[in-house]
Amino acid sequence: MENRTRVFVPMDTTARSLGADGVAEALRREAESRGTAIEIVRNGSRGLYWLEPLVEVEVGAERLAYGPVAESDVGSLLDADLPGGGDHPLALGPTESLPWLAGQSRLTFARVGVTDPLSIDDYRAHDGFRGLEKAASMTPEEIVAEVTESGLRGRGGAAFPTGIKWNTVLKTDAAQKYIACNADEGDSGTFADRMIMESDPYVLLEGMTIAGFATGATMGYVYIRAEYPLAIRIMREAIERAEAAGLLGGNLLDSGRDFNVEVREAAGAYICGEETSMLESLEGKRGMIRFRPPLPAVKGLFGAPTVVNNVISLATVPIILDKGAEYYRDYGSGRSRGTLTVQLAGNIRQGGLVEIGFGRPLSELLYDFGGGSATGRPIRAVQAGGPLAAYVHPSQFDTPLDYEEFAAIGAMIGHGGLVVFDDTVDMGEQARFAMEFCAIESCGKCTPCRVGAVRGVEVIEKILNGENEAANLELLRDLCDTMVSGSLCALGGMAPFPVISVLDHFPEDLRARA
Amino acid sequence: MTEPDRQTRQTIRRLAEAGAAQAGALLPILHAIQDELGYVPDAAVPIVAEVLNLSRAEVHGVVSFYHLFRTDPPGKQTLYVCRAEACQSMGSRELERHARDKLGIGYHETTADGRFSLEPIYCLGNCACSPAVMIDEDVYGRVTPERLDELLD
């Protein structure tokens, strides 16, 4: 086995959806028949999804990239001396020098795509568990202070300061507390949580354990959507391996503290991404949202104080502990500190994961990183922040990616997903779909959402069919206002935002059809 | 719908009892039943309710709340077509129509030969390579109608 050149073939969902398993198998078969000594490592994805399957070969201290590789390219790649880093039409040069990657600040995603996701040795060799080791020597108050000072805000979408939430849980006395990781990544155009879970699962476990140390919680749940079967399998395997290595469980790392994690599989209800609904679901109930107060931090899972954090928030904690609050806070702009994990999705030429400091203009993401639309047509709209968020008009593309700057134009950053549409999009239909989606996914607890969404679909259809257009447009505004003001949670309270953005910025599409 | 046989009832009871001790046991038990039987039969409701000391209404309420629990047997394979916005931007509405025409069924239905069930899904997290479909647990990206035909044939 000695001196076999390592060849990396990603195994994450997107790479596999484009044939990475077939490429890995063809490489193994072809190399064997040629007597070429290679070791195939199934790494996570670097998130340059337009180049997947992206094969890398380790030559000296460098990794060279080739892509996108099809199964049928394997023969010619080996002919061209792939193990020696030979030249080939698919050769892209050193991976780390690709402008798309070199222009990023990968903090949370430092290891993603670099390592073998389930190898604890690999994780350690790439600075893994350093944050946890540091946390183990700190008091809970010190850990909370470090996270607070970093400026980290909830990356699930609500952007609430993580340290403040943790402090509430720390200060609430209880015999049992919980860490509940929200991995019900339901927004279309988002996949950052999935990438962390599939490509660097230990960083999430490490972040959850630090959260446990900081608040006194000894049990954590990862609530993963059922639509992510691979992420579920990998997280479960990672937990088993971490337990076996003494990195989870009793007195872990000889810290004198305990922490356990369990994966819970969701069952396809978008509303369960709302934190109180998720807690109900974890308790084995219908995912009906809860009234607040009490806050989950005071009375959450099974009535106990609970930290509810998104995957990215928790996965960012280890590097903050490792490198310090200042290091993290130095990235970003205004009150949006650190890095944002942008997910370029939909009709985009170069889609994937871009982690950068807050404050860069949306247009840079769309055109410099994204390379414009996939179809080559003009970009007409971008839905930023998920299905409950506004469609951003090209006149707003200069807006910096910053929570407050986006809020100021009636849009939101949310979980960082950008769904791009070209000029063939029918914005009237997009508005109708926003209401339809809300009607399908409403938990039914409050009337504005449960009934309002159904009425919203009807009134938009009437407008498009030319029935009392002017009166129905007014009615639609009114209905949106009622839903925004009267709904109990963000589903009914925000589902009107995409509709309002269409009324405001794309009115020509929301009128009677000829 | 035919009533499940004795063996199926025993399976349901075994899975319910095996999972009963954990906190928030109902969802994991329903998943275990669906993983083993392919669906959650109506007959599972009273059995699970009894084991967990819940009312039938509570169990039925949970089964019916979540989109991915099904109460009738699926086809040999299940095709999930993503209906969410990223896929819409890359032609998923046409792909949905094609899937329905090709299989001759609508959502939540199974072909007469029992080969395929068709289900809508809202996001597989494959949004940079839209449109996406999933067949059982395998996700496919950049799926054109022609590619879907290949996958289904």
Image (cartoon, coloured by chain):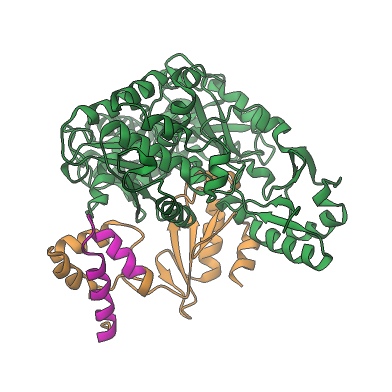
Q: Is residue A269 left or right of residue A450?
A: right
Chain that appears green: A
The residue nearer to you, when weighing A504 against B24, is B24
Residue A103 showing in the rendered view: yes
Q: Which residues are magenta?
A: B6-34
- Image location (x, y in percent) of residue B123: 46, 49
Q: Is residue B35 magenta?
A: no
Question: Which quadrant of the view contains residue A147?
Answer: top left
Q: Is residue A421 left or right of residue A448?
A: right
Residue B131 showing in the rendered view: no
- Image location (x, y in percent) of residue A348: 62, 38
Task: Please name the color used to draw chain B.
Answer: orange
Q: Is residue B16 magenta?
A: yes
Quarter of the image where the N terminus of chain B is located: bottom left
Quarter of the image where the C terminus of chain B is located: bottom right
The residue nearer to you, when weighing B124 against A223, is A223
In the displayed image of the protein, which residue is found farthest to the front? A254
- Image location (x, y in percent) of residue A377: 67, 36
Query: Looking at the image, is B112 positioned above or below residue B71?
Result: below
Residue under the image location 37 percent in, 35 percent down: A210
Count of numbered circles in the view: 0
Q: Main secondary structure of the magenta part?
A: helix
Question: Which quadrant of the view contains residue A152?
Answer: top left
- Image location (x, y in percent) of residue B83: 47, 51
Query: Looking at the image, is B115 positioned above or below residue B98?
Result: below
